[in-house]
Image: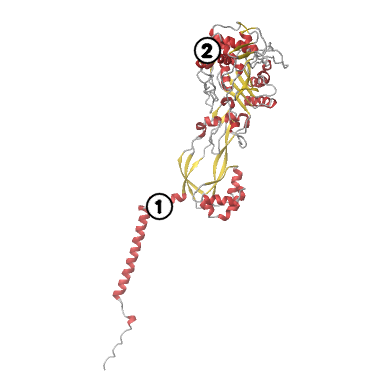
Amino acid sequence: MKPASKSPAPASLRPRGPRVRRRLALVITLLVLVGVGLLARAVDLQVVRREFLQQQGDMRFLRELPIPVSRGSIFDRNGEPLAVSTPVDSLWADPPVLLAHADRIPQLAKALDVNAAELQRRLEQRSNMEFVYLRRMMDPVAAHAVLALKIPGVNKQREYRRYYPTGDVAAQVLGFTNINDQGQEGLELAYNHWLSGKPGLQRVIRNRLGQIVQSVDLVREPVQGHSLTLSIDRSIQYLAYEYLSEAYLKYHARAASMVIMDARTGGILAMVNLPSFNPNNIAGSTPRDWRNRAVTDVFEPGSVMKAFTLSAALDSGKWTPTSPINTTPGWYMMDGYTIRDVADFGKLDLTSVITKSSNVGASLITATFSEKRLYDMLRGFGFGRSTESGFPGEASGLLPVYTSWRPINRVTISYGYGLNVTALQLAQAYSTLADGGVLHHPTFVKGDDSAPVRVLPEKYAREMIGMLRTVVSPAGTAPTAMIANYTVAGKTGTAHQAGAGGYLKDEYYAVFCGIVPATDPRLVAVVVVRDPKPDHYGGVVAAPVFRRVMEGALRLLDVPPDNVQHWYGQAPLPVAAGNATGGTP
């Protein structure tokens, strides 16, 4: 029997040997290629393009932020604060992040008390930026309340706001800073580089909401601003402000200034100007209010210049304090102008010319020596040039060169017309007399004393101080400047204001320059009141301010009395007629 034959297997069950192997090889190849691709990509990202990609990542999350620094403080000579910087918070936003959460903008606007639509419009206008201030100089508590809302893209930055404890009392001297804490006026501007310091720089990481999550490293160390100690005495500054303000209001003046200097060093102990302003909030004030009039404003000083005219006379060797001069009949004519005293003083000596403030006497005396001698004396005392105080905008005044003088110019300059000065220049000049003829340039900085320069022999300076003492007596033009238990030397001035087309009939500068104690000078003060009414004489308006301020200043500085046995009495004394304004060409 034949064995049965086997039936062929179905095609689907037949072996596929070569094809399976090919497919497996293909899969493996593909996996290898993918692996190689991934490896190549990894090499590209981690090695080839690492620096570029790191930079791109840093641009999104790594930032360099400034480290704010505190502006240096300003102190008075005794260490009392005059200007300090207090920490505050400023809120800022990353516009793209905040706009991505626009539903939170109304909540933010309500917290900041601003219009929501306006805020959104501002953010949209700056959508290509990463930093926009929302509000600056906020109280830290208020800023924390906004941040507590945890609104994406809203952050804070520490800043500093300037604060002036004395307010308007020393406003024009100190000046103020802008919102970026940079000096804009006064000593804040003059010493801005010293006070400012240099902000630091740190690298930080921010998350996708714009919040700082980590400080990476310090790029640059912050350098704090340096402090500045002034020669100003805050207590004396308050005294000067108080009593000058009373006169300013009482006489309805247009403006007023007072300068007090240390006669031995040139240090400025006080400087007050009215009207004033509040440097803590300058809104409502104008650049006119910011001006330090004692340094920037010039005026014709009137009879206070006679002290320097007569100093030139003494220095000429032709005159002594007792040399006679005849002023009868109390007036004379020159070049069509009348030189006039308020009365016929008759025969006077050099001292009496100062005591009575005789224009006729001063002009006759100056005719006995050369114009160059008078010019050189005035120039030596600092007129017509800067005092070198370093204050921004300081005026140099005007002293015409003597070669351009006509005879009438020499006459009018002898009693304070035909030249312009500042209150600070007058203080410097009277301090020179007070220190025995040695000039010290005024300074606002404690210990920053200039090299002294002798401009008048000590003998003549002492003689002039003795002559000026007669002004502050019942026989002189300024008995209201007398101070109990102290000798006082000084000079009054009452000068017409110049206007378009000539001198103004009823507008004056009332001036007093004083030295105390006269036997051993410590303090020099100048008071200038512009356009006082109804009284306008220096002995009536300005001299009492000097007395009241100096009474307090002498006590504060513990200056010993030098005239206990020779006090005239504390009761008010009548002002002698003769605080002359003189003939005004």
**Identity of the residue drawn at 50% across and 31% down:** 194
Q: In this view, does 470 lie to the left or right of 98?
A: right
Quarter of the picture containing the C terminus is top right
> In the rendered image, is residue 320 in sight?
yes
> In the displayed structure, would residue 145 be above or below residue 199?
below
Q: Nearer the viewer, residue 58 or 345?
A: 345
Q: How many marks?
A: 2
Circle 2 crowding by C-alpha within 10 Å: few under 14, some 14–19, many from 20: many
Q: Where is residue 203 in the image (x, y as percent from the top left)?
A: 46, 44
Which label belongs to residue 371? 2
SS assignment at label 2: helix
> In the displayed structure, would residue 123 be above or below residue 531?
below
Asked if marks 2 and 1 touch (Cβ < 8 Å), the reply is no
Q: Where is residue 91 in the image (x, y as percent from the top left)?
A: 56, 45
**Pointer 1 residue:** 53
Residue at the far right: name it.
571
**Image-quadrant location for residue 547:** top right
Q: Which amino acid does label 1 sit on?
A: Leu
Circle 1 crowding by C-alpha within 10 Å: few under 14, some 14–19, many from 20: few
Q: In this view, does 403 lie to the left or right of 31?
A: right
Q: Where is residue 508 in the image (x, y as percent from the top left)?
A: 64, 22
Residue at the far bottom: name it.
1
Q: Which amino acid does label 2 sit on?
A: Glu
Q: Which of 6 and 240 is in front in this view?
A: 240
Residue at the far front: name it.
336
